Image (cartoon, rainbow, N blue to C red):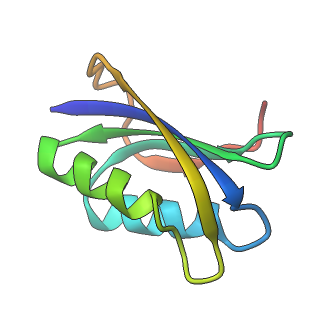
């Protein structure tokens, strides 16, 4: 099992990136969260089976149809198993 923390930069807000991320993560049976950041980027944490997490990270490098991801920062973290769902967060 893996955990990845990602920050997507570019045209990633106002293009349904969070909703797309949630739908895609759920289709891969991942848990975690996604949220917009004040600087215009999108942050997410994914937990789940190794291959599915890596696939999700690769998909985030492209994003939904209207997005234009110019940079994707990926940080490996220790798997914690702390989530039961994948949610869109609205906090900062």
Q: Could you tell me which quadrant the N terminus lies in?
A: top left
Farthest residue, direction bottom? 65
Residue 78, given in percent of the width and then of the height, sits at 28, 16
Q: Which residue: 20% across, 53% down?
A: 52
Residue 5, given in percent of the width and then of the height, sits at 45, 32
Q: Which residue: 63% across, 69% down?
A: 68
Farthest residue, direction front? 70
Residue 57, given in percent of the width and then of the height, sits at 36, 51
Q: Could you tell me which quadrant the C terminus lies in?
A: top right
| Count of numbered circles on the image | 0
Relative to the observer, which residue lies in front, 35 or 55?
A: 55
51 displayed left or right of 48: left
Relative to the observer, which residue lies in front, 76 or 25?
A: 76
Relative to the observer, which residue lies in front, 71 or 81?
A: 71
| Figure quadrant of residue 13 | bottom right
45 displayed left or right of 89: left
Q: Is residue 7 above or below residue 62?
A: above
30 displayed left or right of 33: left
Residue 10, given in percent of the width and then of the height, sits at 70, 57
Q: Which residue: 61% across, 57% down?
A: 70
Q: Which residue: 49% across, 60% down?
A: 22
């Amino acid at each position: 099992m893996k955990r990845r923390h990602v920050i997507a930069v570019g045209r990633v807000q106002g293009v349904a990136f969070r909703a797309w991320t949630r739908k895609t993560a759920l289709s891969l049976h991942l848990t975690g969260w996604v949220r917009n950041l004040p600087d215009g980027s999108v942050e997410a944490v994914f937990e789940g089976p190794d291959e599915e997490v890596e696939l999700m990270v690769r998909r985030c490098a492209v994003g939904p149809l209207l997005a234009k991801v110019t940079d994707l920062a990926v940080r490996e973290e220790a798997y914690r198993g702390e989530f039961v769902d994948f949610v869109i967060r609205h906090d900062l």
